[in-house]
Image (tube, rainbow, N blue to C red):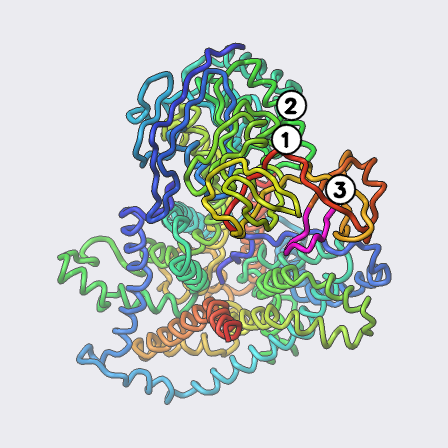
Amino acid sequence: MKRELAWLDRVIFAFAAFFFIAPLIAAAEYSVRGYGNKGHTFANYSWIIHQLGFSAALWTSLRISIITILIVLVLVVPTVVYVHLGGHRYRRLLEIVCLLPIVIPVVSLAIGAQVAMPKNLQSTSYELCFFYVVVALPYVYRSLDIGLQSVALSTLVEASQSLGADWFKTLTMVIIPAIRSSTTGALFITFALSLGEYTLAVLLHFHTFPTWATNISQENIYGSIAISVTTLGGAWILLIFVAFLPRIKSLFARKERVA
Amino acid sequence: MEIHGSTVEFRNVKRTFGTVKALNDFSLTIKPGELVTLLGPSGCGKTTALRILAGIDKDHEGVVEIDGKDMSAVPANKRNIGMVFQAYSLFPNMTATENVAYGLRVRGVDSHKREARARELLELVGLNTQGDRRPTQLSGGQQQRVALARALAIEPSVLLLDEPLSALDAQVRAQLREEIRRIQSTIGISTLFVTHDQEEAMAISDRVGVMNKGVLEQIDEPGKLYNKPKTSFVAGFVGLTNYIPAVMETKSSVIVLNQVVDISDHSVDAKKGEEVRALVRPEELQVEKASEGAVVITKSFLGPITRLGIDAGTPELIYAEVTSKEAKKFDTGDNVKISIHSDSVMVEYA
Amino acid sequence: MVIADELAAPTRTTGGSGSSRLSIKFDRSVLGLLPIFLFLGYFLLYPIASIISSSIHDNKHHLTLSLYGNLFSGNYRTAFTGSFKLAFYSMIVSGIAGAIICWAVVKTNGIVRTITSSAAGVLANTGGVPLAFMFIAAFGQEGLITKLLLNVFHWDLYGGSFDLYNFWGILLVYCFFQVPLMVIIFTPALENLRVEWVEANESLGGSKSQYFRHVLIPVLLPSFISACLLLFASAFSAFATAAAMSNGSIPLVPLFIGNLVNGNVIAGQENQGDAMAMGMVIVSLFVIAAYLLLLRVTRKR
């Protein structure tokens, strides 16, 4: 296959770009419409913030997301690193286990949660945190695994030990710096997932930001759209930024090397 | 299986990629049944020439003929050429037999005939038991044998090999190149072989063409190429060469290592006393023990011969080769005297 | 949430340190697995076990498979049929559209490639409520795109049978995240196509269509089908988007379950809902199993 882009490819790209960008632009336009379709204004955005329950819902979601990433940090990250340093056989087993949640539809998990979980757990919104960890697990595992493999952690640890470092030194000076970037990525994915998760929250009757946003759509559709645009636009910008981060980093690194 | 050997001719072929001249006025004739190798560093144009002959590369000036027929109007899939690629060219969804039979299949040969033919060829390359295996189940060497069988199945007029051994282990490489040569000369098919490995080129070719930056610097039998290189690039690329600082004595002789030696070529125009470099092969140097003078710095055992790296006051070590038996006399740190045992040397500007 | 592009590129375990070198660690690392096993055991397996258990008991706590039997008739059957239909159409449309885009993407590199792959990643994970509202804004009766199509192309979107809230509307929305997902999953398969195969085909005398028939299609088909299976599973399980958009008119299993949860149904039927939920798990299991099987076939090549 020739490696140059034929006109057909450009057409394909143009179509694709249109189909995916147009809705967001349209929604953005919609969100700045004045009431009754007259004129354009940012009033809808300020309206959201002043609604009853906005800050409560947002705070709830933030709280849940923070607890979720803490659980991931304390439970999942050490496990993956530990097993990675250990043996081949168990790494495969952990991989299978961590990919298991993909098979279970979130709806079914929600139903199961309702049936299985004790009432006292169900009364606090923290129940969601545990399930969000389950749902995020495959993504977290993959992010960590790719990072660990590219760093060849076990080799680094052996090198460190052969040079005479004890376990604490190896941990702080070798392991933690090595896993920093992949851990950050994994936590980021978890945070984004927790903030935007709707299914579990609504089926278990919790009031998080996504459920609140859906509810107020009954009152003011423009407001909900404003929220959606913000959420989507923000997520897109952040994710694209993360994707371009390595390029930006190498740009700075090159400058340093030249200097 | 015998094939009528074809004549291949390149005439003044030029190929540029943007501003880079991949091939510059390239002319070459391959005689019927001959195995010609194009040898050179990456980017020298050898693969470009091969791809132009195959018809895969179509934007070129100049003429390419097979048996006197101009190929410019003939598309790649009608040229009846067999091609073996460096790697990955076997179709992964087919067994070895199916791969070999593929060329026959697209020509409409019925399945019995083509299977029989495929088995015949697999036997020729020594893989008659592996016919039902898929490419991923075969080793690198085996895959290349299948690729060779596949190329020969269509009874091509010319065989093209694009660095077929470069991706293989050293031992497999040596073995397979002998086999390729054996099959090629038995069948009598005109062959163009491309490689950057000079040992490979010299071992199996009828003639070797050394290329550099799109230009064919010299084409000759391997022995002539080695002993009578026409340019310093060829001298440097083929075999090991020492570049020793020397001083012109007369128009046709030079003082090197305190010896006066004739110059073999006259491409250098220099006056007496001018500084130049002499190109001397390691085996042209004789090494004797001495009480003072040059010092042996390194000693590398290479099997039948040993290579000595000697510091004779020149900017780089001078490498001499002696039989390993003789090399027992010398140790690192010993003083030696080097002398040139050759009628003449090549010379280039310093 | 969309089924992970995780399955698209399963993590491969390359050779790690031999177990003999860190022999003390080797035994202890089993213990290392314990916390997460317990965690998943309680928060994943236990809920699922619970609904398995409740779905095989009727109101009088007798063991029975009747609840599953009910899924094959009446509203339940309609819901399952609806979900299958949606997932299937979504799979076909997104599979083909995604493959076409892939084919163009594979030819790019450098900055265009980075943009397209990160865009695909972002779009594939766009789902749920924001996505639904975005489409409502864009394609609704007062939407910008609707107006644009009307004024510029004289195409009245709502003149015909189109309705954002009916089957085809939801299909359109699903394509928004399914197509990028397809691009993500399928690009590696296209990248594995070697240019040597095209050239070998040419040198052996084959035409372009022979290459397609004998090499390209056979090589790509397993990867294409397995990618489609992932799309199917993802579309089948999706809840949030459908919930935000549906006005109850479209029969889908997740929505049905949602209704049961909200009490829009006769009491004493909770176990039926559990059977439905397990039904979803079973379908998902089948699809993923088929996917893994196909994956092994392609890996063997």
Q: Earlier in the sequence, mark 1 or mark 2?
A: 2
Residue B204 place in picture, x, y as percent? 59, 25
Q: Are marks 2 and 3 on the same chain?
A: yes
Q: Earlier in the sequence, mark 2 or mark 3?
A: 2
- Tell me the crowding category of disc 2: few under 14, some 14 to 19, or many 20 or more residues within 10 angstroms, Cα based: some
C258 in relation to A118, above or below: above
Give the left or right position of residue C259, taking residue C41 as reference. Answer: left
Q: Is residue C186 visible?
A: yes
Specify the segment rendered in magenta. Answer: B308-318
Chain letter for mark 3, please: B
Residue B165 place in picture, x, y as percent? 59, 33
The residue to which callout 3 is attached is B287
Which numbered circle lies on residue C79? none
- Tell me the crowding category of disc 1: few under 14, some 14 to 19, or many 20 or more residues within 10 angstroms, Cα based: some
Which-is-in-front pick, marks 1 and 2?
A: 1
Q: Which residue sits at x=43%, y=29%?
A: C201
For the residue labelled by badge 3, is the local secondary structure a helix, a strand or a loop?
strand
Which-is-in-front pick, marks 2 and 3?
A: 3
What kind of residue is marked 1? Answer: Gly
Q: Which residue sits at x=68%, y=55%?
A: B313
Q: CA distance from mark 2 to mark 3?
A: 53 Å
The residue to which callout 1 is attached is B141
For the residue labelled by badge 1, is the local secondary structure a helix, a strand or a loop?
helix
Q: CA distance from mark 1 to mark 3?
A: 42 Å
C31, B75: nearer the viewer: B75
Q: CA distance from mark 1 to mark 2?
A: 13 Å
Chain letter for mark 2, please: B
Residue B129 place in picture, x, y as percent? 66, 20
The residue to which callout 2 is attached is B130
